[in-house]
Image (cartoon, grey):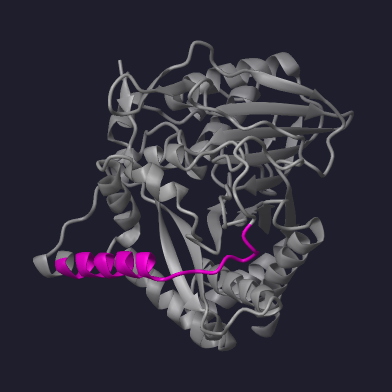
Amino acid sequence: MIWPLPLTPFEDYMLADDRPNYPMNGFIRLRFAGQIHRPNLDAAVSRAISRHPLLSAVVSRPGRRWIWMPANEPPTVCWLDGPPTEALPRLKPLNVRVEPGIRVVAVQGSAQTDIIVQSHHSCCDGVGLLRFIEDLLICYALRCGGGNDAMLPPIDPQQLRHRGTFGRTGGSLRFHLERDTHALRGACRFLRRRLEPLVADEGPEDLSRLPPSYPVSYTQRLEPEETARLLDATRASGVTLNDLLVREFFLALARRMETTGHRQRQWLRVYVPMNLRCAHHDRLPAANVMSMVFLDRRLRDTQQPRRLLASIHKEMALIKRLELGATFVFFIGLFQHLPGGLSRMCRKRRCMSTAGLTNLGPLFSRNPLTNAQGLLTAGDLVLREIDFLGCWRPLTPMTFAAFSYAGRLSLTIHYNPRAFSASEATAMLDDFIGGMRGYANDAE
């Protein structure tokens, strides 16, 4: 028995930052070739959900703190008439106070099937959602007569009790002093610096409704040969792909802001989610075990791209060495114990970040259903493409997600259509991925 489960500081923060017109909802769209077998998908969803208790839970507040408790009814598949289109279907936000924080939507055509998994960020992060999706596809393959139960990775729901602990490594007193000094300085910079948003303030929030279209996204992909050249170029330069993604993101943001007359002394801030899972989370079901780091640069810093890349590489290496990724969770944990602390922090009308960038790395590369071409197959379905949509919030009107599948690097933008037109969002992403292509080509 694991219930009730108190919310961790990060879960509490995501719940406090949720609002009807800025829902803390993320999406993963899986695009398959082939027709799905409905009874098998229904059964696979039911079995996969049973392995991840937080995905069939709701929050309640019997006392001073929010807790997770089982929902009255587990989630089921929502079937929509096809055929699938490039545009995602309009989906209403999830409200974890009255329903589980996950929704599985299937759209089937004659030769193509889309499965969209929507989740509330208070119940799981992107890594946890991907773990659920892997289980779902394995369960579907088993229902179709392929493989055996040994393909499912072991899960221990009791580990959910420890999802808010991150197993920091030991070290000398000097190491801890250095870490805590950097953490305190970073927090002071975060609170002191004032950002101008990427687009003009939308004005007073309308808390009653979403934009007419939600969610809206756009994805671009590099071919396997381009992706391989890009990885070779980063290795030869002594930087990581994540360092380069952050650099090119800053450059794309700067080019956008320069066209709207922002000052060269203006700060840009990119938030980057950090996975805090360690060895004692090896059997953890879907959950939030993450934090965020915030990288600040002035607009003028983007005028020297090589120096910018070197500074990002140095900063990210410092964050990893000193385990600074948990700093944000530590500080929101302090706010959690103040009366109205998290709600007050989330409702301030100030720009907390210019935009967000998530790097999920390779997807499904070690899944037992993946074939020699790197494509995941389940029954008669072949997973061709993936789109990943993060959350946006007030004055942070877009998030980018980077990931690779079957040897192809993909970038997805999820944007607020009240703040950006489709052509503006497309131009932003095209500019971003154009920079990645240019880096790979220059290295040849």
Residue farthest front in this picture? 204
* Apparent side of residue 413 relative to residue 272 in the rendered image (left or right): right
Observer able to see residue 289: no
The stretch drawn in magenta includes residue 323: no
* Position in image of residue 377 (x %, y %): 69, 35
* Apparent side of residue 52 relative to residue 329 in the rendered image (left or right): right
Q: In this figure, what is the number of numbered marks?
A: 0
Work out whether 142 lies above or below 28.
Answer: above
Residue farthest left in this picture? 173
Observer able to see residue 417: yes
> In the image, which residues are magenta?
177-201
Q: Residue at x 89, y 28 (%)?
A: 110
Question: What secondary structure do most residues of the magenta stretch adopt?
Answer: helix
Work out whether 201 lies above or below 178.
Answer: above
In the picture, residue 61 is in which quadrant? Answer: top left
* Position in image of residue 130 (x %, y %): 54, 39
Q: Nearer the viewer, residue 76 or 256?
A: 256
Which image quarter is the N terminus in? top left
* Position in image of residue 109 (x %, y %): 86, 29
Q: Residue at x 52, y 44 (%)?
A: 126
Which image quarter is the C terminus in? bottom right
Q: Residue at x 15, y 62 (%)?
A: 171
Residue farthest right in this picture? 110
* Position in image of residue 328 (x %, y %): 34, 55
The stretch drawn in magenta includes residue 188: yes
Work out whether 24 lies above or below 110.
Answer: below
Q: Nearer the viewer, residue 229 or 52?
A: 52
